Amino acid sequence: SYLSLAGKVALVTGGSRGIGKAIALTFADAGADIVISSRKQAALDEVAAEIRATGRSALAVAAHNRQPDDLRQLIERVKAEFGRLDILVNNAATNPVMAPLVDTDEKVFDVIMNTNLKGYFLLSQMAAKMMIAQGGGNILNISSIGGISPDKGLGVYCISKAAINMLTRALALELGE
């Protein structure tokens, strides 16, 4: 394989479908054991079965990226099951409404920022502490072209993705060594 992740443990949020599912399956094919999270346990269980079919271990944990307690419990499950975390892929995101910024409700703003930005921040913080203690690891934050160039009707989503880009740079500056 062009990529070897043998002996590694990867956590992929938003792992039940789309980009997250594709990353989880690719990492499993490369030899990693996989933890996937999203809101719906049934969908996670289906993907976990696909991962196990590759011969890798899979842990499926329902966790909402907007709920700090869910994220803490997710990291605790990773520790209990695998004792380490080598790769975190922050992928879970939301964009519940398409509207001009001037018409976007504050509650929508909070939902997007708390899911897309605060969730990435908190999970990165928790994962980084594990990674520092074990001597290293990798954090990958999935962003969007919208984080570089705004799109009409997607203003708050684009702002959240631009913030993720800066979060990634700030984490790299602090943790890169």
Image (cartoon, rainbow, N blue to C red):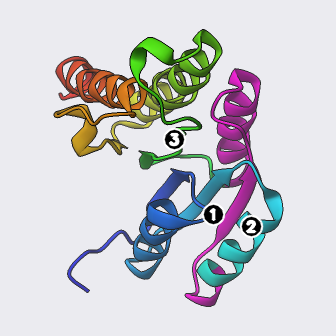
From this view, report whether residue 156 is shown above or below residue 35: above
Mark closer to the chain start, 3 or 2? 2
Residue count near mark 1 (Cα–Cα under 10 Å), binned few <14, some 14–19, many ≥20: many
SS assignment at label 3: loop
The reply to whether discs 2 and 1 touch (Cβ–Cβ < 8 Å) is: yes
| Relative depth, front residue between 86 and 103 | 103
Q: In this view, does 90 lie to the left or right of 141?
A: right
Tell me which residue sits at (58%, 86%) in the image.
Answer: 55
Residue count near mark 3 (Cα–Cα under 10 Å), binned few <14, some 14–19, many ≥20: many
Image quarter (top left, top right, bottom left or bottom right) of the N terminus: bottom left
- Work out how far the residue at label 2 is from the one at label 1, CA to CA, in angstroms: 6 Å
**Residue for badge 3:** 93
| Relative depth, front residue between 95 and 23 | 95
Q: Mark 3 or mark 1, which is nearer to you? A: 3
Image quarter (top left, top right, bottom left or bottom right) of the C terminus: top left
x, y percentage for residue 12? 52, 53
Task: Tell me the kind of residue under disc 3.
Answer: Ala
Q: What stretch is highlighted in magenta?
A: 52-81
SS assignment at label 1: loop
Task: Tell me the kind of residue under disc 2.
Answer: Ala
Tell me which residue sits at (62%, 57%) in the image.
Answer: 36
Q: Which mark is residue 16?
A: 1
Q: In which quarter of the image is residue 108?
A: top right
x, y percentage for residue 35? 61, 57
Mark closer to the chain start, 3 or 1? 1
Let me know if residue 65 is in the magenta part. Answer: yes
x, y percentage for residue 127? 49, 33
From this view, report whether residue 107 is shown above or below residue 32: above
Tell me which residue sits at (50%, 16%) in the image.
Answer: 103
Task: Tell me the kind of residue under disc 1.
Answer: Ser
The reply to whether discs 3 and 1 touch (Cβ–Cβ < 8 Å) is: no
| Relative depth, front residue between 46 and 146 | 146
